[in-house]
Image (tube, rainbow, N blue to C red):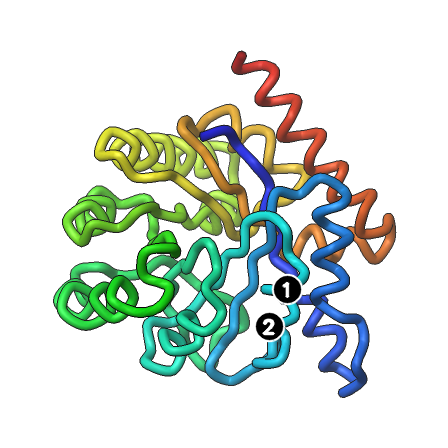
Amino acid sequence: MPMQLLVNIDHIATLRNARGEGYPVPAQAAQICEKAGAAGIVFHLRGDRRHIMDHDLSELKESVQGVLDFEMAATEEMIALLHQVQPNICTLVPEGREELTTEGGLHLAAVFEDFKTRVFPAIRNGAAGSKVEISLFVDPNPDDIQGAIELGSDAIELHTGTYANASTPSAAQAELDRLATAAKMAHAAGLKVNAGHGLNQKNLTPFLRAVPHLADISIGHALISEAVFHGLANTVQAYMTIIEQVKEEQR
């Protein structure tokens, strides 16, 4: 599957909620992103509803023409909403009430039995079960990749935050090596390899060049921040240009 850009529009909702007004509308932002070339949209409905709200779900489902990726904690509430929305992908993520953003991947050893006996059956056996792709947001650790394989996940999303926040070139390279190894392991087992967290126009090209088998690249905060100055469509197109350039290099 070729690399493609998915835009996380959570922080369009953050801006809306800052004043309690009805704008900007996440679904409208999603339409602009897709028209500019994005292959789809990511949203994270958190338990505390700090950005995306329940009413956004039906609006996004109706307006998004490409891939719709529902990031969610593995709670009964979110699984029920997943079956109502029936997105293309559900990405299961850890969620802490005090964190500003998702701070790392799932620790699969800790949640493996719960995912095996409760979460995966609840998703697979519900209304969205045969239609939704399950992806697990994980750090690039062999044990977590193996856990995703054993659970029968359709995909993983590699947590790229450690790479993005690396303080030295050597630290960044070490994390790229870990990401590449994890991507190869997941791909060899038949899992789709997605990635995201902390990626921006500066660090995206080295990442795409170093890590093989990438499919969906999820970018949110940096893209929305840059859009304040350059416009949403222009910024999406700038990221698309980076992705297309690397794809051309790899042909």
- Give the amino acid type for the residue marked by disc 1 in the picture: Glu
The secondary element bearing badge 2 is classed as helix
- Residue 46 or residue 55, whichever sits in front: 55
Q: Quadrant of residue 115?
A: bottom left
Name the residue at 61% across, 42% down.
39
Local crowd at mark 2 within 10 Å, few (<14), some, or many (≥20)? few
Question: Residue 83 in the image: x percent, y percent?
Answer: 40, 71
Residue 93 percent location from the top left of the image: 38, 64
What number is the disc on residue 58?
Answer: 2
Mark 1 Cα-neighbour bin, 10 Å: few <14, some 14–19, many ≥20 = few
Q: Which residue carries the number 1 mark? A: 62
Query: In the rendered image, which quarter is residue 179 located in?
Result: top left
Q: Which one is nearer the viewer's eye here, 51 or 210?
A: 51
Mark 2 vs 1: CB contact within 8 A = yes
Q: Secondary structure at mark 1?
A: helix
Across and down, in percent, residue 224 comes to 72, 56
User: Which residue occupies the foreground of this view, 163 or 76?
Assistant: 76
Look at 56% across and 51% down and name the residue there: 198
Look at the image and tell me in which quarter the N terminus lies: top left
Q: CA–CA distance between discs 2 and 1?
A: 6 Å
Point 35% across, 68% down: residue = 127
Question: Which label number is shown at residue 151?
Answer: none
